[in-house]
Image: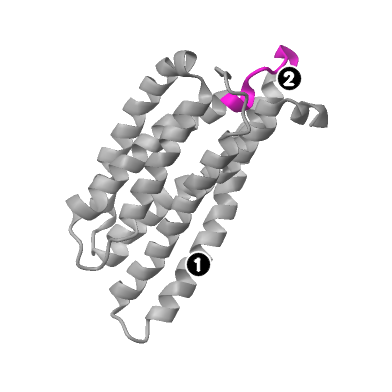
Amino acid sequence: MPLRLFKIRGVAVGSGMLLLFGGIAIAMWYFTSLFLQNVLGYSALQAGLGQTPAAVTFMVITRWAAALLPRTGVRPLVLAGSGCFVAGFGWLSLAHADSGYVTSVLGPTLLIAVGIGLTFPTIMAAATAGVPDSDAGIIGGLAQTASQVGGSIGLAVLATAASARAAMEAGGSSPAAALAAGYGLVFLMAAGLGLAIAVVSLLLPRQQRG
Protein backbone atom coordinates (compact mmCIF):
# COMPACT_ATOMS: atom_id res chain seq x y z
CA MET A 1 0.00 0.00 0.00
CA PRO A 2 1.79 3.18 -1.18
CA LEU A 3 1.43 5.70 1.66
CA ARG A 4 1.82 8.52 -0.85
CA LEU A 5 -1.81 7.92 -1.83
CA PHE A 6 -2.94 9.33 1.51
CA LYS A 7 -1.57 12.69 0.36
CA ILE A 8 -4.65 12.84 -1.88
CA ARG A 9 -7.22 14.54 0.35
CA GLY A 10 -10.18 12.65 -1.05
CA VAL A 11 -8.52 9.31 -0.35
CA ALA A 12 -7.59 10.18 3.24
CA VAL A 13 -10.88 11.86 4.15
CA GLY A 14 -13.01 9.36 2.25
CA SER A 15 -11.33 6.43 4.00
CA GLY A 16 -11.98 8.06 7.35
CA MET A 17 -15.65 8.53 6.52
CA LEU A 18 -15.92 4.92 5.39
CA LEU A 19 -14.54 3.76 8.74
CA LEU A 20 -17.31 5.71 10.48
CA PHE A 21 -19.90 4.53 7.97
CA GLY A 22 -19.13 0.89 8.84
CA GLY A 23 -20.59 1.51 12.30
CA ILE A 24 -23.67 3.14 10.77
CA ALA A 25 -24.35 0.07 8.62
CA ILE A 26 -23.99 -2.30 11.57
CA ALA A 27 -26.31 -0.22 13.72
CA MET A 28 -28.92 -0.07 10.97
CA TRP A 29 -29.11 -3.60 9.62
CA TYR A 30 -27.84 -5.74 12.51
CA PHE A 31 -29.14 -3.99 15.61
CA THR A 32 -32.48 -3.06 14.08
CA SER A 33 -33.00 -6.73 13.29
CA LEU A 34 -32.13 -7.63 16.88
CA PHE A 35 -34.58 -5.01 18.15
CA LEU A 36 -37.38 -6.43 16.05
CA GLN A 37 -36.68 -9.98 17.22
CA ASN A 38 -35.61 -9.58 20.84
CA VAL A 39 -37.79 -6.63 21.85
CA LEU A 40 -40.87 -6.73 19.63
CA GLY A 41 -40.89 -10.54 19.39
CA TYR A 42 -40.67 -10.88 15.61
CA SER A 43 -39.43 -14.09 14.01
CA ALA A 44 -36.29 -13.93 11.85
CA LEU A 45 -38.46 -13.96 8.72
CA GLN A 46 -40.71 -11.20 10.03
CA ALA A 47 -37.68 -9.12 10.98
CA GLY A 48 -36.29 -9.54 7.48
CA LEU A 49 -39.58 -8.50 5.95
CA GLY A 50 -39.70 -5.57 8.36
CA GLN A 51 -36.41 -4.31 6.98
CA THR A 52 -37.36 -4.81 3.33
CA PRO A 53 -38.90 -1.33 2.85
CA ALA A 54 -35.66 0.25 4.05
CA ALA A 55 -33.58 -1.97 1.73
CA VAL A 56 -35.72 -0.99 -1.26
CA THR A 57 -35.48 2.69 -0.29
CA PHE A 58 -31.70 2.41 -0.05
CA MET A 59 -31.43 0.95 -3.56
CA VAL A 60 -33.68 3.61 -5.08
CA ILE A 61 -31.90 6.51 -3.38
CA THR A 62 -28.48 5.11 -4.30
CA ARG A 63 -29.32 5.28 -8.01
CA TRP A 64 -30.68 8.80 -7.61
CA ALA A 65 -27.62 9.96 -5.66
CA ALA A 66 -25.25 8.55 -8.29
CA ALA A 67 -27.04 10.57 -10.96
CA LEU A 68 -27.08 13.71 -8.79
CA LEU A 69 -23.42 13.57 -7.70
CA PRO A 70 -21.90 15.15 -10.85
CA ARG A 71 -24.10 18.21 -10.36
CA THR A 72 -23.94 18.71 -6.59
CA GLY A 73 -20.53 17.40 -5.64
CA VAL A 74 -19.78 15.18 -2.68
CA ARG A 75 -20.22 17.42 0.34
CA PRO A 76 -23.91 18.40 -0.03
CA LEU A 77 -24.99 14.77 -0.42
CA VAL A 78 -22.92 13.62 2.54
CA LEU A 79 -24.27 16.41 4.74
CA ALA A 80 -27.85 15.62 3.71
CA GLY A 81 -27.29 11.92 4.40
CA SER A 82 -25.70 12.65 7.76
CA GLY A 83 -28.73 14.73 8.71
CA CYS A 84 -30.89 11.70 7.93
CA PHE A 85 -28.67 9.57 10.18
CA VAL A 86 -28.92 11.94 13.11
CA ALA A 87 -32.68 12.34 12.78
CA GLY A 88 -33.41 8.70 11.98
CA PHE A 89 -31.27 7.13 14.69
CA GLY A 90 -32.42 9.73 17.20
CA TRP A 91 -36.01 8.77 16.41
CA LEU A 92 -35.21 5.05 16.53
CA SER A 93 -33.56 5.41 19.95
CA LEU A 94 -36.97 6.31 21.39
CA ALA A 95 -38.43 2.89 20.53
CA HIS A 96 -39.28 0.66 23.48
CA ALA A 97 -40.88 -2.69 24.28
CA ASP A 98 -44.41 -1.40 23.69
CA SER A 99 -43.63 0.47 20.47
CA GLY A 100 -45.48 -0.14 17.24
CA TYR A 101 -43.63 -1.09 14.09
CA VAL A 102 -44.87 1.63 11.75
CA THR A 103 -44.25 4.70 13.90
CA SER A 104 -41.22 3.54 15.89
CA VAL A 105 -39.28 1.33 13.45
CA LEU A 106 -40.48 1.72 9.87
CA GLY A 107 -40.44 5.53 9.88
CA PRO A 108 -36.92 5.98 11.26
CA THR A 109 -35.41 3.11 9.27
CA LEU A 110 -36.74 4.60 6.03
CA LEU A 111 -35.09 7.88 6.96
CA ILE A 112 -31.83 6.14 7.77
CA ALA A 113 -32.02 4.21 4.49
CA VAL A 114 -32.27 7.52 2.64
CA GLY A 115 -29.12 8.60 4.46
CA ILE A 116 -27.29 5.41 3.51
CA GLY A 117 -28.35 5.77 -0.10
CA LEU A 118 -27.09 9.35 -0.21
CA THR A 119 -23.81 8.80 1.58
CA PHE A 120 -22.40 5.37 0.76
CA PRO A 121 -21.94 5.71 -3.02
CA THR A 122 -20.95 9.34 -2.55
CA ILE A 123 -18.23 8.55 -0.01
CA MET A 124 -16.97 5.70 -2.20
CA ALA A 125 -16.70 8.16 -5.09
CA ALA A 126 -14.87 10.67 -2.89
CA ALA A 127 -12.42 8.04 -1.67
CA THR A 128 -11.49 7.00 -5.20
CA ALA A 129 -11.53 10.39 -6.95
CA GLY A 130 -8.38 12.02 -8.25
CA VAL A 131 -6.40 8.77 -8.17
CA PRO A 132 -3.99 7.82 -10.98
CA ASP A 133 -5.33 5.00 -13.14
CA SER A 134 -2.41 2.78 -12.11
CA ASP A 135 -3.51 3.01 -8.47
CA ALA A 136 -7.27 2.66 -9.01
CA GLY A 137 -7.35 -0.99 -7.95
CA ILE A 138 -5.44 -0.33 -4.75
CA ILE A 139 -7.67 2.57 -3.78
CA GLY A 140 -10.82 0.58 -4.51
CA GLY A 141 -9.56 -2.17 -2.24
CA LEU A 142 -8.64 0.36 0.45
CA ALA A 143 -12.13 1.86 0.35
CA GLN A 144 -13.79 -1.54 0.75
CA THR A 145 -11.41 -2.49 3.54
CA ALA A 146 -12.03 0.75 5.42
CA SER A 147 -15.78 0.11 5.38
CA GLN A 148 -15.35 -3.50 6.54
CA VAL A 149 -12.91 -2.60 9.30
CA GLY A 150 -15.25 0.14 10.45
CA GLY A 151 -18.08 -2.37 10.58
CA SER A 152 -16.00 -4.82 12.61
CA ILE A 153 -14.92 -2.18 15.11
CA GLY A 154 -18.43 -0.78 15.21
CA LEU A 155 -19.93 -4.18 15.95
CA ALA A 156 -17.52 -4.76 18.84
CA VAL A 157 -18.04 -1.33 20.38
CA LEU A 158 -21.80 -1.15 19.88
CA ALA A 159 -22.44 -4.70 21.09
CA THR A 160 -20.40 -4.04 24.22
CA ALA A 161 -22.28 -0.82 24.90
CA ALA A 162 -25.66 -2.51 24.34
CA SER A 163 -24.82 -5.39 26.66
CA ALA A 164 -23.56 -3.09 29.40
CA ARG A 165 -26.64 -0.86 29.23
CA ALA A 166 -29.02 -3.84 29.18
CA ALA A 167 -27.26 -5.31 32.22
CA MET A 168 -27.69 -2.04 34.10
CA GLU A 169 -31.41 -2.00 33.33
CA ALA A 170 -32.01 -5.70 33.99
CA GLY A 171 -32.69 -5.39 37.71
CA GLY A 172 -35.68 -3.09 37.52
CA SER A 173 -37.07 -3.84 34.05
CA SER A 174 -38.44 -6.70 32.01
CA PRO A 175 -35.94 -8.48 29.74
CA ALA A 176 -37.44 -6.82 26.66
CA ALA A 177 -37.29 -3.37 28.25
CA ALA A 178 -33.68 -3.89 29.31
CA LEU A 179 -32.71 -4.94 25.80
CA ALA A 180 -34.59 -1.98 24.35
CA ALA A 181 -32.54 0.33 26.55
CA GLY A 182 -29.34 -1.29 25.27
CA TYR A 183 -30.36 -0.96 21.65
CA GLY A 184 -31.50 2.61 22.29
CA LEU A 185 -27.97 3.47 23.38
CA VAL A 186 -26.62 1.86 20.21
CA PHE A 187 -28.90 4.01 18.07
CA LEU A 188 -27.84 7.17 19.91
CA MET A 189 -24.21 6.26 19.32
CA ALA A 190 -25.00 5.72 15.63
CA ALA A 191 -26.54 9.20 15.51
CA GLY A 192 -23.21 10.45 16.86
CA LEU A 193 -21.39 8.60 14.07
CA GLY A 194 -23.65 10.34 11.57
CA LEU A 195 -22.69 13.69 13.04
CA ALA A 196 -19.01 12.71 12.91
CA ILE A 197 -19.30 11.86 9.22
CA ALA A 198 -20.76 15.32 8.59
CA VAL A 199 -17.86 16.97 10.42
CA VAL A 200 -15.21 14.93 8.59
CA SER A 201 -16.85 15.69 5.24
CA LEU A 202 -16.04 19.37 5.75
CA LEU A 203 -12.39 18.44 5.10
CA LEU A 204 -13.23 17.44 1.52
CA PRO A 205 -12.49 19.83 -1.35
CA ARG A 206 -15.58 21.98 -1.72
CA GLN A 207 -16.17 21.28 -5.40
CA GLN A 208 -15.21 17.60 -5.46
CA ARG A 209 -17.48 15.73 -7.83
CA GLY A 210 -16.23 12.15 -7.32
| Amino acid type indicated by mark 2 | Asp
Which of the 4 quarters of the picture holds residue 117?
Answer: top left
Query: Is residue 52 visible to us here?
Result: yes
Query: Is residue 121 visible to us here?
Result: no
Q: Residue at x 29, y 72 (%)?
A: 176
Q: Residue at x 44, y 19 (%)?
A: 66
Q: Position of residue 124 (x, y in %)?
A: 55, 28
Front-lying residue, 135 or 48: 135
Which of the 4 quarters of the picture holds residue 115?
Answer: top left
Q: Residues within 10 Å of mark 2 (few under 14, many from 20)?
A: few
Q: Position of residue 45 (x, y in %)?
A: 26, 51
The span shown in magenta is 126-134
Most extreme residue toward the bottom is 171
Residue 129 belongs to magenta span: yes
Q: Position of residue 23 (x, y in %)?
A: 51, 49
Determine whether 57 is above or below 64 in the image.
Answer: below
In-image side of 120 versus 152 (left or right): left
Image disc number at residue 190? none
Are circles 1 and 2 on residues that touch, CB within 8 Å?
Answer: no
Residue 80 belongs to magenta span: no
Image disc number at residue 135? 2
Determine whether 104 is above or below 123 in the image.
Answer: below
Q: Residue at x 54, y 46 (%)?
A: 196
Image disc number at residue 161? 1
Secondary structure category for the residue under label 1: helix
Determine whether 10 is above or below 131 in the image.
Answer: below
| Amino acid type indicated by mark 1 | Ala
In-image side of 14 versus 68 (left or right): right
Secondary structure category for the residue under label 2: helix
Determine whether 87 is above or below 11 in the image.
Answer: below
**The N terminus lies in which quarter of the figure?**
top right
